[in-house]
Protein backbone atom coordinates (compact mmCIF):
# COMPACT_ATOMS: atom_id res chain seq x y z
CA UNK A 1 0.00 0.00 0.00
CA UNK A 2 1.18 3.53 -0.82
CA UNK A 3 2.47 5.75 1.97
CA UNK A 4 -0.47 7.75 3.35
CA UNK A 5 0.45 10.38 5.94
CA UNK A 6 -3.20 11.02 6.75
CA UNK A 7 -3.78 7.66 8.43
CA UNK A 8 -4.34 8.25 12.18
CA UNK A 9 -1.72 5.63 13.10
CA UNK A 10 0.89 7.52 11.04
CA UNK A 11 0.00 10.82 12.69
CA UNK A 12 0.26 9.07 16.08
CA UNK A 13 3.66 7.45 15.37
CA UNK A 14 5.09 7.36 11.83
CA UNK A 15 8.44 5.78 12.74
CA UNK A 16 7.63 2.02 12.55
CA UNK A 17 6.07 2.56 9.10
CA UNK A 18 9.09 4.61 7.95
CA UNK A 19 11.42 1.76 9.02
CA UNK A 20 9.42 -0.94 7.24
CA UNK A 21 9.21 1.09 4.03
CA UNK A 22 12.90 2.04 4.12
CA UNK A 23 13.73 -1.68 4.15
CA UNK A 24 11.51 -2.18 1.03
CA UNK A 25 12.78 0.78 -1.02
CA UNK A 26 14.32 4.12 0.00
CA UNK A 27 12.19 6.09 -2.48
CA UNK A 28 8.56 5.23 -3.19
CA UNK A 29 5.60 6.77 -4.98
CA UNK A 30 2.81 8.03 -2.71
CA UNK A 31 -0.55 8.17 -4.47
CA UNK A 32 -2.27 10.09 -1.66
CA UNK A 33 0.44 12.79 -1.82
CA UNK A 34 0.97 12.67 -5.60
CA UNK A 35 4.76 12.75 -5.11
CA UNK A 36 7.71 10.44 -4.61
CA UNK A 37 8.79 10.25 -0.96
CA UNK A 38 12.20 9.41 0.50
CA UNK A 39 12.65 7.10 3.49
CA UNK A 40 16.47 7.10 3.70
CA UNK A 41 18.92 9.76 4.88
CA UNK A 42 21.04 9.74 1.70
CA UNK A 43 17.95 10.08 -0.49
CA UNK A 44 16.43 12.94 1.55
CA UNK A 45 19.78 14.74 1.54
CA UNK A 46 20.07 14.27 -2.24
CA UNK A 47 16.49 15.49 -2.82
CA UNK A 48 17.15 18.66 -0.80
CA UNK A 49 20.51 19.42 -2.45
CA UNK A 50 20.01 18.39 -6.08
CA UNK A 51 19.98 21.49 -8.30
CA UNK A 52 17.71 19.74 -10.77
CA UNK A 53 15.05 19.79 -8.04
CA UNK A 54 13.67 23.14 -6.99
CA UNK A 55 11.40 24.83 -4.48
CA UNK A 56 9.73 26.51 -7.42
CA UNK A 57 6.64 28.39 -6.45
CA UNK A 58 3.95 26.29 -7.94
CA UNK A 59 0.59 25.95 -6.25
CA UNK A 60 0.38 22.56 -4.63
CA UNK A 61 -3.37 22.75 -4.92
CA UNK A 62 -5.36 25.21 -7.00
CA UNK A 63 -5.00 28.47 -5.14
CA UNK A 64 -7.72 30.31 -7.08
CA UNK A 65 -9.44 32.67 -4.71
CA UNK A 66 -6.48 32.76 -2.31
CA UNK A 67 -4.71 35.97 -3.35
CA UNK A 68 -3.16 36.87 0.01
CA UNK A 69 -1.95 33.29 0.62
CA UNK A 70 -0.44 33.32 -2.87
CA UNK A 71 1.24 36.71 -2.33
CA UNK A 72 2.98 35.47 0.83
CA UNK A 73 4.37 32.44 -0.97
CA UNK A 74 5.34 33.81 -4.40
CA UNK A 75 7.60 36.32 -2.65
CA UNK A 76 9.01 33.99 0.01
CA UNK A 77 12.69 32.95 -0.12
CA UNK A 78 11.60 29.45 0.87
CA UNK A 79 9.51 29.11 -2.29
CA UNK A 80 12.08 30.58 -4.69
CA UNK A 81 15.30 29.43 -6.31
CA UNK A 82 18.35 31.47 -7.36
CA UNK A 83 18.72 34.24 -8.29
CA UNK A 84 15.60 35.46 -6.39
CA UNK A 85 16.32 33.13 -3.46
CA UNK A 86 19.93 34.33 -3.18
CA UNK A 87 18.89 37.98 -3.15
CA UNK A 88 16.15 37.53 -0.55
CA UNK A 89 18.24 35.30 1.71
CA UNK A 90 21.36 37.47 1.59
CA UNK A 91 19.40 40.41 2.88
CA UNK A 92 18.22 38.73 6.07
CA UNK A 93 21.14 36.37 6.62
CA UNK A 94 23.33 38.76 8.64
CA UNK A 95 20.74 39.14 11.40
CA UNK A 96 20.58 35.37 11.90
CA UNK A 97 24.31 34.60 11.98
CA UNK A 98 25.72 32.79 14.99
CA UNK A 99 27.52 35.82 16.38
CA UNK A 100 24.46 38.05 16.06
CA UNK A 101 22.23 35.50 17.72
CA UNK A 102 24.68 34.94 20.62
CA UNK A 103 23.97 38.55 21.64
CA UNK A 104 20.38 37.50 22.34
CA UNK A 105 21.24 34.52 24.57
CA UNK A 106 20.92 36.28 27.93
CA UNK A 107 17.67 37.95 27.01
CA UNK A 108 16.21 34.66 25.76
CA UNK A 109 17.30 32.92 28.97
CA UNK A 110 15.53 35.59 31.02
CA UNK A 111 12.31 35.09 29.04
CA UNK A 112 12.55 31.32 29.62
CA UNK A 113 13.02 31.81 33.37
CA UNK A 114 10.00 34.14 33.51
CA UNK A 115 7.86 31.52 31.76
CA UNK A 116 9.12 28.76 34.08
CA UNK A 117 8.05 30.92 37.00
CA UNK A 118 4.53 31.17 35.52
CA UNK A 119 4.40 27.38 35.09
CA UNK A 120 5.59 26.86 38.69
CA UNK A 121 2.99 29.29 40.03
CA UNK A 122 0.20 27.69 38.00
CA UNK A 123 1.10 24.21 39.28
CA UNK A 124 2.15 25.12 42.81
CA UNK A 125 -1.00 23.59 44.33
CA UNK A 126 -0.34 20.29 42.56
CA UNK A 127 -2.80 20.94 39.74
CA UNK A 128 -2.14 19.86 36.16
CA UNK A 129 -0.62 22.50 33.89
CA UNK A 130 -0.56 22.48 30.06
CA UNK A 131 3.05 23.17 29.10
CA UNK A 132 2.23 24.07 25.46
CA UNK A 133 0.50 27.45 25.96
CA UNK A 134 2.40 28.31 29.13
CA UNK A 135 5.96 27.36 28.17
CA UNK A 136 6.52 25.96 24.66
CA UNK A 137 4.65 28.60 22.67
CA UNK A 138 5.41 31.99 24.24
CA UNK A 139 9.22 31.88 24.02
CA UNK A 140 9.76 31.60 20.22
CA UNK A 141 6.82 33.95 19.59
CA UNK A 142 8.27 36.60 21.91
CA UNK A 143 11.77 36.22 20.45
CA UNK A 144 10.85 36.64 16.79
CA UNK A 145 8.32 39.39 17.53
CA UNK A 146 10.98 41.23 19.55
CA UNK A 147 13.53 40.88 16.75
CA UNK A 148 11.14 42.21 14.13
CA UNK A 149 9.88 45.06 16.30
CA UNK A 150 6.28 43.86 16.72
CA UNK A 151 4.75 45.77 19.65
CA UNK A 152 4.09 43.62 22.76
CA UNK A 153 0.35 44.36 22.63
CA UNK A 154 0.03 42.83 19.13
CA UNK A 155 1.84 39.54 19.76
CA UNK A 156 -1.32 37.59 20.59
CA UNK A 157 -2.58 38.20 17.06
CA UNK A 158 0.28 36.53 15.28
CA UNK A 159 0.37 32.87 16.22
CA UNK A 160 -3.28 32.12 15.31
CA UNK A 161 -2.60 33.59 11.85
CA UNK A 162 0.54 31.44 11.40
CA UNK A 163 -1.31 28.35 12.62
CA UNK A 164 -4.19 28.88 10.16
CA UNK A 165 -1.78 29.37 7.24
CA UNK A 166 0.39 26.31 7.93
CA UNK A 167 -2.70 24.12 8.16
CA UNK A 168 -2.89 24.52 4.38
CA UNK A 169 0.55 22.85 4.06
CA UNK A 170 -0.99 19.57 5.19
CA UNK A 171 -2.19 17.11 2.52
CA UNK A 172 -5.83 17.18 1.33
CA UNK A 173 -7.02 20.39 2.97
CA UNK A 174 -10.77 21.03 3.19
CA UNK A 175 -12.50 24.11 1.79
CA UNK A 176 -12.84 25.46 5.33
CA UNK A 177 -9.06 25.10 5.92
CA UNK A 178 -8.35 26.91 2.62
CA UNK A 179 -10.70 29.73 3.52
CA UNK A 180 -9.29 30.08 7.04
CA UNK A 181 -5.74 30.21 5.60
CA UNK A 182 -6.74 32.95 3.16
CA UNK A 183 -8.50 35.01 5.83
CA UNK A 184 -5.47 34.71 8.11
CA UNK A 185 -3.08 35.56 5.26
CA UNK A 186 -5.12 38.66 4.31
CA UNK A 187 -5.14 39.88 7.93
CA UNK A 188 -1.43 39.10 8.32
CA UNK A 189 -0.54 40.97 5.11
CA UNK A 190 -2.61 44.00 6.12
CA UNK A 191 -1.07 43.98 9.62
CA UNK A 192 2.51 43.74 8.33
CA UNK A 193 1.92 46.45 5.70
CA UNK A 194 0.86 48.80 8.52
CA UNK A 195 3.84 47.70 10.60
CA UNK A 196 6.20 48.41 7.69
CA UNK A 197 4.63 51.86 7.24
CA UNK A 198 5.10 52.55 10.96
CA UNK A 199 8.76 51.42 10.98
CA UNK A 200 9.43 53.37 7.82
CA UNK A 201 8.21 56.53 9.56
CA UNK A 202 9.84 55.66 12.92
CA UNK A 203 12.89 53.44 12.32
CA UNK A 204 14.17 51.54 15.35
CA UNK A 205 16.96 49.08 16.17
CA UNK A 206 14.91 46.15 14.90
CA UNK A 207 15.16 43.77 11.96
CA UNK A 208 12.18 45.17 10.07
CA UNK A 209 13.64 48.68 10.19
CA UNK A 210 16.96 47.38 8.87
CA UNK A 211 15.24 45.45 6.08
CA UNK A 212 13.41 48.64 5.10
CA UNK A 213 16.66 50.61 5.19
CA UNK A 214 18.40 48.06 2.94
CA UNK A 215 15.62 48.50 0.44
CA UNK A 216 15.71 52.28 0.64
CA UNK A 217 19.46 52.29 0.03
CA UNK A 218 18.89 50.44 -3.25
CA UNK A 219 15.33 50.69 -4.48
CA UNK A 220 15.51 47.54 -6.58
CA UNK A 221 16.37 45.16 -3.78
CA UNK A 222 13.25 44.37 -1.74
CA UNK A 223 9.84 45.21 -3.08
CA UNK A 224 7.04 46.06 -0.66
CA UNK A 225 5.50 42.61 -1.22
CA UNK A 226 8.87 40.91 -0.63
CA UNK A 227 9.25 42.84 2.60
CA UNK A 228 5.83 41.67 3.77
CA UNK A 229 6.42 38.05 2.70
CA UNK A 230 9.85 37.98 4.39
CA UNK A 231 8.52 39.36 7.69
CA UNK A 232 5.66 36.86 7.68
CA UNK A 233 7.95 33.93 6.72
CA UNK A 234 10.29 34.74 9.61
CA UNK A 235 7.39 34.88 12.04
CA UNK A 236 5.79 31.68 10.79
CA UNK A 237 9.12 29.82 10.81
CA UNK A 238 9.77 31.21 14.27
CA UNK A 239 6.33 30.19 15.52
CA UNK A 240 5.80 26.76 14.12
CA UNK A 241 8.96 24.70 14.51
CA UNK A 242 10.76 25.74 17.71
CA UNK A 243 7.48 25.49 19.65
CA UNK A 244 7.08 21.90 18.56
CA UNK A 245 10.63 20.86 19.45
CA UNK A 246 9.97 22.05 22.99
CA UNK A 247 6.70 20.07 23.03
CA UNK A 248 7.93 16.87 21.33
CA UNK A 249 11.31 17.03 23.06
CA UNK A 250 9.97 17.52 26.58
CA UNK A 251 7.55 14.65 26.03
CA UNK A 252 10.38 12.41 24.78
CA UNK A 253 12.46 13.21 27.87
CA UNK A 254 9.56 12.65 30.27
CA UNK A 255 8.99 9.26 28.64
CA UNK A 256 12.70 8.38 29.00
CA UNK A 257 13.46 9.24 32.64
CA UNK A 258 16.97 7.75 32.52
CA UNK A 259 17.86 10.13 29.68
CA UNK A 260 16.33 13.04 31.56
CA UNK A 261 18.32 12.09 34.66
CA UNK A 262 21.54 11.89 32.61
CA UNK A 263 21.03 15.36 31.16
CA UNK A 264 23.57 17.77 32.65
CA UNK A 265 23.81 21.49 31.72
CA UNK A 266 26.94 20.73 29.62
CA UNK A 267 24.97 18.19 27.59
CA UNK A 268 22.13 20.59 26.72
CA UNK A 269 23.42 21.58 23.22
CA UNK A 270 24.00 17.91 22.30
CA UNK A 271 20.58 16.96 23.70
CA UNK A 272 18.82 19.67 21.67
CA UNK A 273 20.19 18.14 18.44
CA UNK A 274 19.02 14.71 19.58
CA UNK A 275 15.52 15.97 20.37
CA UNK A 276 15.26 17.51 16.89
CA UNK A 277 16.46 14.20 15.39
CA UNK A 278 14.33 11.90 17.55
CA UNK A 279 10.93 13.51 16.87
CA UNK A 280 11.39 16.12 14.14
CA UNK A 281 8.91 19.02 14.22
CA UNK A 282 8.86 19.36 10.42
CA UNK A 283 8.48 16.10 8.58
CA UNK A 284 8.10 16.82 4.88
CA UNK A 285 9.54 19.24 2.30
CA UNK A 286 8.80 18.99 -1.41
CA UNK A 287 10.87 19.70 -4.48
CA UNK A 288 9.86 19.76 -8.17
CA UNK A 289 12.13 18.34 -10.90
CA UNK A 290 13.24 20.65 -13.71
CA UNK A 291 15.28 17.89 -15.44
CA UNK A 292 15.12 14.08 -15.06
CA UNK A 293 16.71 13.28 -11.66
CA UNK A 294 17.64 9.81 -10.49
CA UNK A 295 17.42 9.23 -6.72
CA UNK A 296 17.23 5.96 -4.80
CA UNK A 297 16.46 3.89 -7.88
CA UNK A 298 13.66 6.04 -9.32
CA UNK A 299 13.69 8.77 -11.97
CA UNK A 300 11.79 11.93 -11.08
CA UNK A 301 10.69 13.40 -14.41
CA UNK A 302 10.46 17.17 -15.05
CA UNK A 303 7.31 18.52 -13.39
CA UNK A 304 7.09 15.59 -10.98
CA UNK A 305 7.64 16.10 -7.28
CA UNK A 306 9.68 14.36 -4.61
CA UNK A 307 9.28 14.97 -0.88
CA UNK A 308 12.12 14.55 1.62
CA UNK A 309 10.74 12.93 4.77
CA UNK A 310 13.03 14.43 7.42
CA UNK A 311 11.77 12.30 10.30
CA UNK A 312 12.41 9.13 8.27
CA UNK A 313 15.92 10.31 7.32
CA UNK A 314 16.63 11.01 10.99
CA UNK A 315 15.90 7.40 11.97
CA UNK A 316 17.97 5.77 9.20
CA UNK A 317 20.16 3.00 10.71
CA UNK A 318 22.72 3.54 7.93
CA UNK A 319 23.60 6.86 9.61
CA UNK A 320 22.42 6.59 13.24
CA UNK A 321 23.34 3.64 15.45
CA UNK A 322 20.26 2.29 17.22
CA UNK A 323 18.15 5.06 15.63
CA UNK A 324 14.97 4.50 17.66
CA UNK A 325 16.84 5.07 20.93
CA UNK A 326 16.77 8.54 22.47
CA UNK A 327 20.38 9.27 23.43
CA UNK A 328 21.10 12.74 24.82
CA UNK A 329 24.84 12.11 24.37
CA UNK A 330 24.59 11.22 20.66
CA UNK A 331 27.45 12.86 18.79
CA UNK A 332 28.05 13.37 15.93
CA UNK A 333 24.42 13.83 14.99
CA UNK A 334 24.07 14.66 11.27
CA UNK A 335 20.26 14.95 11.41
CA UNK A 336 18.35 16.68 8.62
CA UNK A 337 15.90 18.42 10.96
CA UNK A 338 17.01 21.84 9.66
CA UNK A 339 17.08 20.65 6.04
CA UNK A 340 20.12 20.74 3.71
CA UNK A 341 21.43 22.63 0.70
CA UNK A 342 20.62 26.22 -0.21
CA UNK A 343 17.36 26.30 1.79
CA UNK A 344 19.08 25.03 4.99
CA UNK A 345 17.23 26.68 7.86
CA UNK A 346 18.25 30.32 8.10
CA UNK A 347 16.98 30.42 11.68
CA UNK A 348 18.96 27.39 12.92
CA UNK A 349 21.38 29.41 15.12
CA UNK A 350 18.44 31.28 16.68
CA UNK A 351 16.38 28.10 17.11
CA UNK A 352 19.37 26.44 18.82
CA UNK A 353 19.77 29.30 21.31
CA UNK A 354 16.01 29.28 22.03
CA UNK A 355 15.88 25.53 22.49
CA UNK A 356 19.01 25.42 24.64
CA UNK A 357 17.58 28.16 26.88
CA UNK A 358 14.24 26.39 27.08
CA UNK A 359 15.71 23.01 27.95
CA UNK A 360 18.32 24.33 30.39
CA UNK A 361 15.62 26.30 32.23
CA UNK A 362 13.31 23.30 32.42
CA UNK A 363 16.12 21.33 34.09
CA UNK A 364 17.09 23.97 36.62
CA UNK A 365 13.79 25.72 37.34
CA UNK A 366 11.26 22.89 36.99
CA UNK A 367 13.11 19.86 38.37
CA UNK A 368 9.94 18.10 39.55
CA UNK A 369 8.30 18.09 36.11
CA UNK A 370 6.21 14.94 35.50
CA UNK A 371 3.73 13.82 32.85
CA UNK A 372 0.16 14.12 34.14
CA UNK A 373 -1.84 12.36 31.44
CA UNK A 374 -1.81 11.50 27.76
CA UNK A 375 -0.82 14.50 25.59
CA UNK A 376 -2.98 15.27 22.55
CA UNK A 377 -1.40 15.47 19.10
CA UNK A 378 -2.45 17.95 16.46
CA UNK A 379 -4.01 16.00 13.55
CA UNK A 380 -1.23 16.97 11.15
CA UNK A 381 1.71 15.23 9.49
CA UNK A 382 3.96 17.92 7.97
CA UNK A 383 4.04 19.67 11.34
CA UNK A 384 4.55 17.06 14.01
CA UNK A 385 3.05 18.86 16.95
CA UNK A 386 1.42 18.46 20.32
CA UNK A 387 -1.84 20.28 21.03
CA UNK A 388 -1.48 19.74 24.80
CA UNK A 389 1.24 18.54 27.17
CA UNK A 390 -0.25 18.03 30.64
CA UNK A 391 2.31 18.05 33.46
CA UNK A 392 2.65 18.56 37.16
CA UNK A 393 5.58 20.52 38.53
CA UNK A 394 6.30 19.13 41.99
C1 LIG B 1 13.80 23.94 15.66
C2 LIG B 1 13.29 24.88 14.93
C3 LIG B 1 13.36 24.91 13.43
C4 LIG B 1 13.42 23.87 12.53
C5 LIG B 1 13.43 22.37 12.84
C6 LIG B 1 13.48 24.45 11.21
C7 LIG B 1 13.57 23.72 10.05
C8 LIG B 1 13.70 24.25 8.78
C9 LIG B 1 13.83 23.48 7.57
C10 LIG B 1 13.80 21.96 7.48
C11 LIG B 1 13.97 24.35 6.53
C12 LIG B 1 14.22 23.99 5.06
C13 LIG B 1 12.99 23.89 4.22
C14 LIG B 1 13.27 23.39 2.83
O1 LIG B 1 14.36 22.89 2.55
O2 LIG B 1 12.38 23.45 1.96
C15 LIG B 1 13.93 25.68 7.08
C16 LIG B 1 14.03 26.84 6.35
C17 LIG B 1 13.93 28.08 6.91
N1 LIG B 1 13.83 28.39 8.26
FE1 LIG B 1 13.73 27.12 9.79
N2 LIG B 1 13.44 25.81 11.32
C18 LIG B 1 13.38 26.13 12.66
C19 LIG B 1 13.35 27.39 13.21
C20 LIG B 1 13.44 28.54 12.50
C21 LIG B 1 13.46 29.87 13.06
C22 LIG B 1 13.41 30.19 14.56
C23 LIG B 1 13.54 30.74 12.01
C24 LIG B 1 13.61 32.24 12.00
C25 LIG B 1 13.05 33.02 12.77
C26 LIG B 1 13.59 29.96 10.80
C27 LIG B 1 13.68 30.49 9.53
C28 LIG B 1 13.77 29.76 8.37
C29 LIG B 1 13.83 30.36 7.05
C30 LIG B 1 13.78 31.85 6.73
C31 LIG B 1 13.93 29.32 6.14
C32 LIG B 1 14.03 29.44 4.61
C33 LIG B 1 15.46 29.41 4.20
C34 LIG B 1 15.62 29.44 2.70
O3 LIG B 1 14.66 29.21 1.94
O4 LIG B 1 16.75 29.73 2.26
N3 LIG B 1 13.53 28.64 11.13
N4 LIG B 1 13.76 25.59 8.46
Image: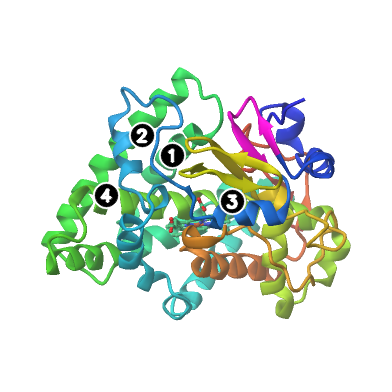
Residue 220 spot, x, y in % from top left? 15, 60
Callout 1 crowding tier (Cα within 10 Å): few <14, some 14–19, many ≥20:
few
Image position of 180 (left or right of 229): right
Between residue 330 and residue 1, name the one nearer to us.
1
- Please give the residue where the numbered disc 4 appears in the rendered image: 228
- Please give the residue where the numbered disc 1 appears in the rendered image: 160
**Tag shown at residue 47:** 3
- Please give the residue where the numbered disc 2 appears in the rendered image: 184
Q: Nearer the viewer, mark 1 or mark 4?
A: 4
What span is colored magenta in the figure? Answer: 28-38
Instruction: Kindly report the distance in space between the C-alpha atoms of the residues bearing marks 1 and 4.
Output: 18 Å
Between residue 194 and residue 53, name the one nearer to us.
53
Between residue 115 and residue 82, name the one nearer to us.
82
Q: Residue at x 65, y 50 (%)?
A: 310
Q: Nearer the viewer, mark 2 or mark 3?
A: 3
**Of the image marks 2 and 1, the number of the one nearer the N terminus:** 1
Amino acid sequence: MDFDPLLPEIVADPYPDFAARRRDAPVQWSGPLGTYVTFGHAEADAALRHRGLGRLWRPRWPVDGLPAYTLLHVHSMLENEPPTHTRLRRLVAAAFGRRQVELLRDRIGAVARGLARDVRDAGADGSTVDLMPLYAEPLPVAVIAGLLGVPDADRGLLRPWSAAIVRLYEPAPTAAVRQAAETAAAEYVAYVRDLVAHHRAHPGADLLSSLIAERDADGTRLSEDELVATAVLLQMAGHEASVNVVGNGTLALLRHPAQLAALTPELVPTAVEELIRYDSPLQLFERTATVPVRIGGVTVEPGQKIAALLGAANRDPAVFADPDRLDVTRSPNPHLGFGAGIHFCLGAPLARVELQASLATLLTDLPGLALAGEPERRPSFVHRALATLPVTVR
